[in-house]
Image: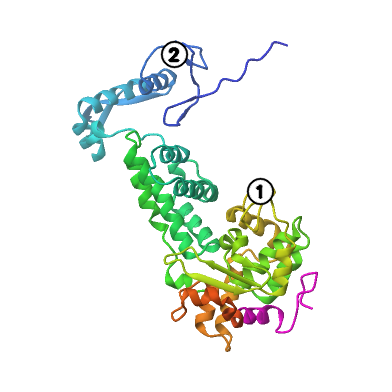
């Protein structure tokens, strides 16, 4: 049997159009695959037009004369020729008399044909980030934070590779995802970092198509921080659902980590991003307290009194080297909240049999709601637990006496485990 050659690939134009039946040789000549005919033309567009003319077989009629028939009706005489002749004639007319062609066809846009530019290939997102890395004048710390947000959140969550991929619908879905996973202040911060990359690219690199960037920035108007209404619309996790998560944690490959993360999040009203960034120097396990500053405008202080179950869970986590972070991956780096959130959805939530509507932020909402609704808890201490500004509470007072927030954490414990109950080893209330 004779060997069969490799099937020729269709030619792909510079703007991504696939031209089936046309190939380009190594020496630059064009070849019609079906007939083997070759021709030379340096201009890509003219070569494609010639290919279409050479392969068109259909006969078309070109009107050449109008006259009155015997019955008085208008008759038209046609001259039939290859379709390629008609297209060549039309191209010549369009180039020489665009106003006339526009008037005769009723397509006014054709009058501006000489001012229409071919669309440029869509800018790759990795190219924009490369320009930012090369031209950004910020500190290395700020630069690293922007790069991490762009790569681990924006590109990963949207699944986009070019500017054209970022449709308004995709951007809306991205906003919905980050609002569900991050605090309002962090959402605002991340959106700002994303825009920083875009602004740096067109301001510092003349090769960037500014029109594409401006169009994307217009579509990105849907990326706005959560409104007050969204912030004030909590979705507290139910007691039953939280208990199901604790039980499911035991069935995972890292039960100690999941258990500690769940308890710490509910105990201290933390978002997933806050849990992943938890540091050992923010914890005093001997005295059972947590003290930190929330990363938002004004750097609000936050505090929590840790439950005995939370302390036991934290003590069960092995420390990895000299890492300052509590929750560290097997590679020695702190957990990424984006990937950890995906694992929560794909592994923990699935094992617990919970609805897809349940997100990690519901743990934080549950803690804050329980503290706010408890009659014995003053509002300022509920706000302190959640990391909100608390009028009347000075930072030095909270640092000296974080135990002041104990009524709030007791209220959360009572709501989810019962006032006098401890959590049994299998994650269920005793």
Residue beneath label 2, please? 28
Residue at 76 percent of width and 55 percent of height: 253
Residue at 71 percent of width and 82 percent of height: 418
Q: Nearer the viewer, residue 296 or 342?
A: 296
Residue beneath label 1, please? 332
Q: Nearer the viewer, residue 182 or 407?
A: 407
Residue 151's spot in the image, x, y percent? 52, 46
Q: Is residue 134 above or below residue 37?
A: below
Mark nearer the viewer, 1 or 2: 1
Q: Give the quadrant of residue 424.
A: bottom right
Residue 185's spot in the image, x, y percent? 46, 63
Residue count near mark 2 (Cα–Cα under 10 Å), binned few <14, some 14–19, many ≥20: few
Q: Is residue 214 above or below residue 294?
A: above
Considering the numbered disc 2 on the image, is that residue within a helix, a strand or a loop?
Answer: loop
Q: Does the magenta portion include 371?
A: no
Residue 192's spot in the image, x, y percent? 41, 54
Residue 423's spot in the image, x, y percent? 76, 75
**Residue extending furthest toward the bottom:** 375
Q: Is residue 267 above or below residue 340?
A: below
Q: What residue range appears in magenta?
A: 409-430
Along the horizontal axis of the image, is 116 left or right of 341? left
Along the horizontal axis of the image, is 203 left or right of 158? left
Locate the N terminus and report the quarter of the image it occupies.
top right
Distance CA(mark 1)–CA(mark 2): 53 Å
**Residue 396 shows in this picture:** yes
Mark 1 and mark 2 lie on one chain; the one further toward the N terminus is 2
Locate the C terminus and report the quarter of the image it occupies.
bottom right
Q: Is residue 165 above or below residue 112?
A: below
Along the horizontal axis of the image, is 220 left or right of 427? left
């Amino acid at each position: 049997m004779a060997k069969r050659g490799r099937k020729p690939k269709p030619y792909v134009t510079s703007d991504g159009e696939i031209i089936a039946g046309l190939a380009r040789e190594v020496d630059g000549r064009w070849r019609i695959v079906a007939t083997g005919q070759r021709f030379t033309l340096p201009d890509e567009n003219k070569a494609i037009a010639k290919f279409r003319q050479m392969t068109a077989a259909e006969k078309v009629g070109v009107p050449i004369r109008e006259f009155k028939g015997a019955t008085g009706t208008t008759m038209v005489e046609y001259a039939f020729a290859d379709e390629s002749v008609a297209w060549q004639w039309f191209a010549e007319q369009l180039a020489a008399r665009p106003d006339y062609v526009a008037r005769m066809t009723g397509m006014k846009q054709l009058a501006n044909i000489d001012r229409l530019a071919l669309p440029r290939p869509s800018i790759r997102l990795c190219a924009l980030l490369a320009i930012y890395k090369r031209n950004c004048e910020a500190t290395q710390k700020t630069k690293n934070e922007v790069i991490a947000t762009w790569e681990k959140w924006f590109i990963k969550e949207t699944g986009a590779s070019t500017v054209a991929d970022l449709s308004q619908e995709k951007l809306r879905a991205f906003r919905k995802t980050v609002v569900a996973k991050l605090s309002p202040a962090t959402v605002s911060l991340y959106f700002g970092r994303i825009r920083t990359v875009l602004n740096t690219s067109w301001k510092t690199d003349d090769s960037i198509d500014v029109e594409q960037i401006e169009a994307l920035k217009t579509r990105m108007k849907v990326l706005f921080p959560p409104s007050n209404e969204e912030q004030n619309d909590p979705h507290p996790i139910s007691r039953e659902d939280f208990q199901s998560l604790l039980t499911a944690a035991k069935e995972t490959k890292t039960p100690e980590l999941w258990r500690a993360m769940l308890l710490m999040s509910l105990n201290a009203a933390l978002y997933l991003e806050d849990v992943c960034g938890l540091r050992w120097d923010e914890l005093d396990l001997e005295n059972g307290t947590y003290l930190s500053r929330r990363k938002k405008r004004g750097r609000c202080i936050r505090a929590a009194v840790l439950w005995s179950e939370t302390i036991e869970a934290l003590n069960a986590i092995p420390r990895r080297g000299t890492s300052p972070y509590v929750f560290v991956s097997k590679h020695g780096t702190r957990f990424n909240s984006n990937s950890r959130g995906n694992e929560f959805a794909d592994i923990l939530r699935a094992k617990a049999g919970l609805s897809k509507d349940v997100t990690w932020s519901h743990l934080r909402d549950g803690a804050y709601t329980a503290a706010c609704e408890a009659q014995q808890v003053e509002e300022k201490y509920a706000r302190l637990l959640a990391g909100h500004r608390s009028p009347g509470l000075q930072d030095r007072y909270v640092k000296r006496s974080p135990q002041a927030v104990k009524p709030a954490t007791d209220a959360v414990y009572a709501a989810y485990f019962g006032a006098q109950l401890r959590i049994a080893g299998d994650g269920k209330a005793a």
